[in-house]
Image (spheres, rainbow, N blue to C red):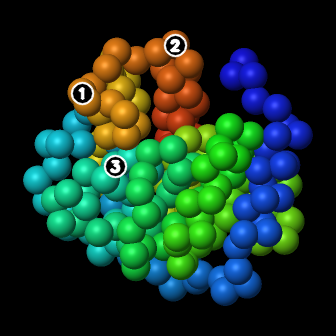
Amino acid sequence: MFGFKEIDDYKSASILNEILSDNPVDLLNILNHKEVAVIGAGPSLEKIDKIREEVIISADGATNYLVSKGIIPDIIVTDLDGIETFPNSVYVVHAHGNNINLLHKVYNMTKVIGTAQVSPFGRINLFGGFTDGDRAVVIAKKFGASKIILYGMDFDSNLIGKFSKPYLLSDVPISWIKRNKLKIAKEIVKLTLEQNL
């Protein structure tokens, strides 16, 4: 449906595995029994007034907006196509066949967990999720968040938020492929939040 090549996903995951250090980050310690805000890069992102949750997880491009408002996320879930690097945050970097050329950004990050959509190996994890936003929700749930509140996760919008890609200057009409990705993401989030782990 989306034209992804599994061999390219393995290649990207292998490169990320080589870049990562053996210093694991303890997501359980950060997320377990905490109220977690998951911030997406949808058009409603700019309407966020306050974030009251104990832990903030941002999805890729939403990070740039949060940082511009003086909010540094605790965890940034990214496939590297929408962000710069920021100190002190934990990065959950997702490797796939379309971001091999961006993996060099990981060298500028100190606390990194690697993920991919292939079988886990070495330092590469398979947490689940399809987009950065729903992957963030899956991670919060997997590591014991007591409550998950979503911001800027506009699954049914006809627009792509301007913060989702660094080259966008305004919200733009949603493409067919993005609409279908968001349908999948919405279903993953729904199923994840319904789980009683």
Q: Residue at x 25, y 51 (%)?
A: 65
Residue sitting farthest toward the left: 49
Confirm whether residue 82 shows in the render. Answer: yes
Tag in front: 3 or 1: 1
Secondary structure at badge 1 equals loop
Q: Residue at x 70, y 80 (%)?
A: 21
Instruction: Point out the tag, 3 or 1, that comes first from the N-terminus.
Output: 3
The residue tagged 3 is 62
**Looking at the picture, does residue 51 appear above or below residue 8?**
below
The residue tagged 1 is 170
Q: Residue at x 72, y 69 (%)?
A: 19
Where's residue 28, x and y in %? 56, 80
Q: Residue at x 74, y 40 (%)?
A: 97
Tags 3 and 1 touching, CB below 8 Å? no
Mark 1 burial class by Cα count in 10 Å: few <14, some 14-19, many 20+? few
Tags 1 and 2 touching, CB below 8 Å? no
